[in-house]
Amino acid sequence: MILRDYLMWFFGGLIIIYMLLVIVTYGLMFFFALLKLRKEHRLDQTEMDDMYIDAFYSKPVSVIIPAYNEEVGIVDSIHSLLSLHYPEFEIIIVNDGSTDRTQEIVIEQFQMKKIEKVIKMEIQASPIVQIYQSQIHQNCFLVEKENGGKADALNVGINVARYPYFCSVDGDSILESTSLLRLMKPIALSDGEVIAAGGNVQIANGMNMQLGSILETNLSKNYLVTMQIIEYFRAFLIGRITLSKFNLVLIISGAFSVFSKKWVVEAGGYTKSMIGEDMELVVKLHRYIRKKKENKRIEFVENPVCWTEAPETMAVLRRQRRRWHQGLLESLWNHKSMTFNPRYGGIGLLSFPYFWLIEGLGPIVELGGYIYIVFAFFLGDIYYEIAILLLLSFVLYGVVFSMMAVLFEAWSKNKTFKVADLIRMMLLSFTEIFWYRPITLFWRCEGLLNFLVRRREWGKMERKGISSKEQESI
Amino acid sequence: MIEFSIQLLLYIIAILLLFCGVVMIYLIYQRRYEERKKHVMEKYIQNTKILWQEYFLEDDRFTVTLIPKNKIQILAVEHIFLSYLRNISNPIIQQKIYTFAQMYLKEYYQNELKSRNWSKKMNAMYRIADFRIKELISTCEVSIKRKHSIEVFQLFKIYSILEKEKFIQEIWLYNDSFSQSEYKKLFSYLEVEMLQRLMEKMERLQQAAQYALIDTIAAKGSMDVIEGLEDLLASEDTEIRIRTLRGLERIGIIRDLETYIPFVNSSIWEERLMVAKLFRYAPLTYTAEHLEKLLQDSNWWVRSQAASTLIEDPRGYQRLKEFIATTNDQYAIDMANEVLGKRMRAV
């Protein structure tokens, strides 16, 4: 055997073992998620909504929207929050030094007037320039501050928040009217055991929306967006449900999550210097829970939905994925001592290894797999068979799991999905491993490279959604 | 070996793809069925809308046409009943719904309770509580596994609505604990007298139930419970004392100011906060001295509440002005200025 053969056998074996590990992990996660959703499949959810609609049974919440150059989506987003079915809440829009008309639009639309308010600085954050209060909605505030990034804006929002729980919502996200009520359910039912909960984020491109309300759900005609929808189904429905069941959640989306203010303040709030500030906060909370030796949980809740706009062009999606992956690795690296550390229970022994191996370093192995297949086909002989084996494992992982996630979502939304959309997504799932998967793997590897060279592409909060798209087109 | 693995993977993929195909066909069929069902339900509601209105609003307008003949019609009737119950508070209509459900829906829910499907069973229990079908309580008791807390909670909810005495007996014996929100919900269906009975032997309840009981009894706003609540201020449990102060503040009546003065110097800031809030219900002449002390408290929330309480009194504005002029405590001055600023804007 020459060196080439040794290398080919070694990498071939490594990639196959890795793929096997991924398939088994995803298979198990899918199984647990299926069990949970099957049980509650036909349960009347409105019964629970009615139970907690009274302030007497629920906890008041401060909804914080960090906004930087969100002039396009901010009004719709605030309208969707104003129409929330929730007994007691306030809305705090934190204008993070926007350079567009975000502040003027909010002041004008909601008749904001300057107010004097003494703020207790519980978390270190940039100084507040001015606070405004809406004259038409007394529970709606606008906080003006200098630009300091999303994490800093959220920290300011937490300082201003009056209530024991706060909900972070992205400036271009739309909530369904029952979303907050359902997201708060595990918190209300646990007597403080659940200290944070994240909702289900889904893609809004193609939807017909007006004044923050969804009038019609349509599937986007853009293939890139549809692929992201399938990807979200897989990530949220399969991954997070199971991780949540065993209190192993490390990521709850910053686009829509609720936290106990007390715990976040004690954990030090959002970290300014990190890219993935939402994941970083969750990891910090887990760390703090263990330090205090308390029995607390962080949960993912699958039925409250937050709609958000997804990138529609390759360039924006590339930047987003690069940033997400860099953020993930930064957080994992920042808390590397938790990996395989029995002091942190399941988080150290299962979550961290899972996120390092499958989410963090996975793109290198997978992309290596694609390169291996190309080489192996040229080399022929036994490598040809290894390549087929690898390709089949990609099909199993990429195509079959995607299709199952689509079916799973359609089944859980039995009364609302459109048959044509289902067929379109199923057909598109077949194509994932040939274009979408390799491209996103490449972008994630770029994120990994950026992490290694400590490259910073931006110094301020990056915007997503419609407004981002508009910016791109300029 | 590799050939075998390829074959195995091919089989697995083929089986899974076949499975996906079958599930897809099933889902498409189900979707069509749901659409048809929805259409039939809407048609039924449209056709019987007037008859239901007449039945609810007029006497002796019952007609056999209203009796549901199949599952879809039962679901439509359920929909109509829930719309009325959730949107209209009329005892006559409520009673007609309960009577009708007792007569014509009971059998359906009885069968649903026997279902192996957990969601179906739960939905039936929800409706039994909504439509007050007392006769099915024993079937509920038999059908639940007593493991799942949601099921047990729903059974207790049915007791608290339909079998109050049984509820009291069972709640003493219940060893597990619900959340405070759940206890509050259960207690909210009971009358003040029953809650007082529970309060007399409060120590037998789970801790979460004790807290929820104080909250619920205070929320009922009855004058009769003040004395009982004041007795709880001597409890050794800090949380009970805080809850009681909050409850008394909610009722909004101070019988004897002296009962509350010790809390001004409490080492627990939540107690100082609650007492600062409670002082809204006593004349400023008696509380000003204590409120000024609380205005200089080490805790931000206590200072904030003391300032708010002071400004609520007609003479509070002047007292705050005088206080700012005489104190050296910058935190207290800032807080006083904020509430003064608020007052100015309100004026």
Image (spheres, grey):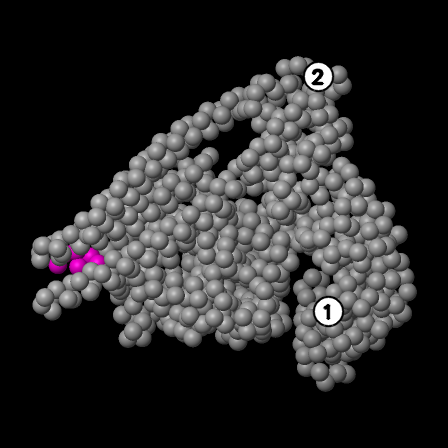
Q: Amino acid at mark 1?
A: Glu
Q: Main secondary structure of the magenta part?
A: helix
In percent of width and height, residue A127 lies at 52, 75
Magenta residues (range)? A369-375
In percent of width and height, residue B134 lies at 74, 32
Left or right position of A412 against A12: right
How crowded is the residue under tag 2: few (<14 C-alpha within 10 Å), some, or many (20+)? Answer: some
Q: Amino acid at mark 2?
A: Phe
Disc marking residue B270: 1
Q: Which residue is mark 2?
A: B62
| Residue drawn at point x = 80 percent, y = 58 percent | B203
| Residue drawn at point x = 67 percent, y = 36 percent | B142
Q: Nearer the viewer, residue A284 or A69?
A: A284
Which image quadrant: the N terminus of chain A?
bottom left
- Which chain contains the residue that carries disc 1? B
What is the spatial separation of the Cα atoms under label 1 and label 2, in whole angstroms?
Answer: 58 Å
Q: Is residue A191 above or below residue B31?
A: below
First in sequence: mark 1 vs mark 2 = 2
| Residue drawn at point x = 43 percent, y = 38 percent | A411
Q: Is residue B174 visible?
A: yes
Can residue A170 be found in the magenta stretch? no
- Number of callouts: 2
Left or right position of B30 against B212: left
